[in-house]
Image (cartoon, helix red, strand yellow):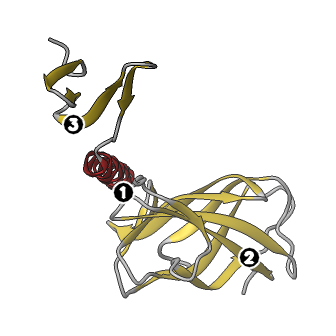
Amino acid sequence: MNGNSAVPQAAGELVYGYGNRVAYDVDSSAGARLDLRVNENFLKIATTMAVMSLVVVCSILTAHAADQKDTRPSTSIGTAHSPAISHAWARATVPGQAVGAAYMKIYSAVDTTLTGIESDVSRSVEVHSMRHQNGVMQMRAQKQLEVPAGQNVDLAPGGIHLMLLGLKKPLKAGESLQLKMTFVDGAGNRTIVPVRVPIRPFGQ
């Protein structure tokens, strides 16, 4: 039997729906007339349950949104926590010279790695290291350069330096070149540090 059907229980009374009782009387001249009095407590309970359900749904959606927060590694440019570059300089070149070199000090408060360099004056830039082996000075390219937390890494003549390969024009004393240095920390966050590099006269 449908739970919402009205079934007479006794003279002057109906049970309607979910146990809600309403009173009725019969007017012989006008036919049957029902005087329905809706159970107010039932309406209050239904309204309260609807509000509580809405609150629960909103809480679940908020928690889900928090769980879905983007945790991908970030990329930033020149922030206050970026590796610090100081004492940057490059040596002037002579016409026809295809390569140049740049030097600097690199400091980082956290462990980070120099993974890439771009320049506006050369086709590419590589990290090179130099060392004596069997009485011969050897220079080797490095794919990346580790920068330990709290330490200065010196790029200087005769040691680690940046090699500017495929110069687009000679490096003239008194001018400057631009570098974009990309660092990646232990969490995978990338930081791009723009560096202005003054060019010194050849021989200095």
Query: Vertically, is 136 above or below 91?
Result: above
Choose mark 3 or mark 1, whichever is in front.
3
Q: Which residue is mark 3?
A: 20
Of the numbered discs in the image, which one, if any, rests on residue 196?
2
Q: Is residue 160 left or right of residue 202?
A: left
For image coordinates 38% across by 55% down, the residue present is 62
Q: Could you say which is closer to the camera, residue 53 or residue 89?
A: 53
Closer to the N terminus: mark 2 or mark 1? 1
Q: Are marks 2 and 3 in contact (CB under 8 Å)?
A: no
Closer to the N terminus: mark 3 or mark 1? 3
Q: Could you say which is closer to the camera, residue 178 or residue 186?
A: 186
For image coordinates 87% across by 61% down, the residue present is 95
Q: Which residue is mark 1?
A: 66
Image coordinates of residue 78 in percent, x first then y, are 62, 74
Q: Which image quadrant: the C terminus?
A: bottom right
CA gap, disc 2 and disc 3:
83 Å
For image coordinates 29% across by 31% down, the residue present is 24
Q: Amino acid at mark 2?
A: Arg
Q: Secondary structure at mark 1?
A: helix
Q: Amino acid at mark 3?
A: Asn
Choose mark 2 or mark 3, whichever is in front.
3
Q: Could you say which is closer to the camera, residue 24 or residue 152?
A: 24
Q: Are marks 2 and 1 in contact (CB under 8 Å)?
A: no
